[in-house]
Image (tube, rainbow, N blue to C red):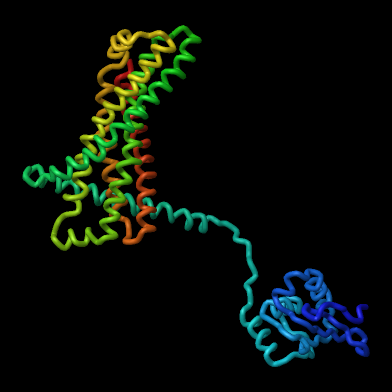
Amino acid sequence: MIDKAIIDTEKPMVTFPEGFGGKLIVLVGLWTLRTLATDRALRQSIKELAVDMDKQWDISRIERLDSAAAFLLWQAWGEKLPANLIMRPEQRRLFKYCHDRKIPTPHPMLPDFATVLRYGQVPLQGFYQHMRAWLTLLGGLTPDFVYLFRNPRAIPYREISLTIYKAGVSALGVTALVGLLVGISMSYLSSLQLQRFGAEIYIIDLLGLSIIRELGPMLTAILVAGRSGSAMTAEIGIMRVTQELDALAALGISHSLRLVVPKVIALAIALPLLIVWTDVMALIGGMISAQLTLDIGYQQFLDRLPKAVPIVNFYIGLAKGVTFGMMIAMIACHYGFLIKPNTESLGDGTTHSVVTTITVVILMDAIFSILFKNVGIP
């Protein structure tokens, strides 16, 4: 039995006064979070001493007692005060606070079907809300196109030409570079495999069909979605932040007619032209690589290409360009109108716009591949 714990007076101390048979426990010193944090043995001894319910505790001699130390004693005593506890009135208020602020016992959450269904409804509701808002935007474009068809003078030619320049002309450099590198990479890697079977001449068929029908439209659409789609979303979002959309509504100017329609028309025109440009650059890169690796001449490449790739594949690529362009513009405008007047919403809306647009482009490309699986295949 410990008669007295000899410790620095600046630290908490437990003593057992003589004459009480070890039944009286006296706490002295500074009982604060700072002093208890470094004395793990003292915390353990308090828990061991609190097991014996016959002992009497005296905490009136503690120089300083904070809420952390009071909570430690409260837990050691089984969340109740021991019998015949000796303490000062201000200390009693601390334990009353511990009693009033009981910490609930954690219970493991067992997943059930209702819980899983409830959490699964959140993304489904978000998808439904986005689809509803997007279809509303699409439905609003129909009367706008009818109005412009009946009133050609109301067509926003300046906005359309500006968007064509920003999304089309300004993207010629990056699409040319990407197309050239993709053509070189595909030609080089394919030549290594075709040489094993003595089928070097079929590299023209492989490059022509894959680039004109699949890679050209999809790569161009992804680049435009990341470059121009995000810019459109941010532009409309900034108009929301600066209250320009509210000003247009106050003047009676249609958001759809002045903001959405020009972008849809411009991308429906610019994207097919960019696809042709990207196809040409990719085929040039593939032709150069085929001449260097397989010794296939440029004239031979150009003569065989129309025979290996039917012209209908070119038309399918252009149809993809028109569809992708309209989808990119509508999705970018949809997320732009959803942006709230704060900077955090602007960043989130732009990110969601790019991710959604790229996903939809890949999905639409897969739909085109399924619908035209037996068209244009020699």
User: How many marks on residues?
Assistant: 0
Vertical placement of residue 275 versus 98, above or below: above
Quadrant of the snapshot with the N terminus:
bottom right
Q: Is residue 91 left or right of residue 154?
A: right
Q: Is residue 304 left or right of residue 289?
A: left
Instruction: Identify which residue is drawn at 81% across, 70% down.
Output: 41
Question: Residue farthest to the bottom?
Answer: 89
Instruction: Identify which residue is drawn at 19% across, 40% down.
Output: 265
Vertical placement of residue 266 versus 36, above or below: above
208 or 187, which lies in front? 187
Q: Is residue 138 left or right of residue 88?
A: left
Q: Is residue 84 left or right of residue 168?
A: right
349 or 356, which lies in front? 349
Instruction: Identify which residue is drawn at 93% across, 90% down.
Output: 19
Q: Where does the image place residue 235, in percent across and percent down from the top left?
A: 27, 51
Vertical placement of residue 370 versus 20, above or below: above
Instruction: Identify which residue is drawn at 32% across, 56% down.
Output: 339
Residue 179's quadrant in the figure?
A: top left
Q: Where does the image place residue 143, in percent across and percent down from the top left?
A: 14, 48
Quadrant of the snapshot with the C terminus:
top left
Residue 354's quadrant in the figure?
A: top left
Q: Where does the image place residue 345, in percent across and percent down from the top left?
A: 37, 57
Residue 307's quadrant in the figure?
A: top left
Q: Where does the image place residue 299, in percent across and percent down from the top left?
A: 30, 9
Vertical placement of residue 320 versus 256, above or below: above
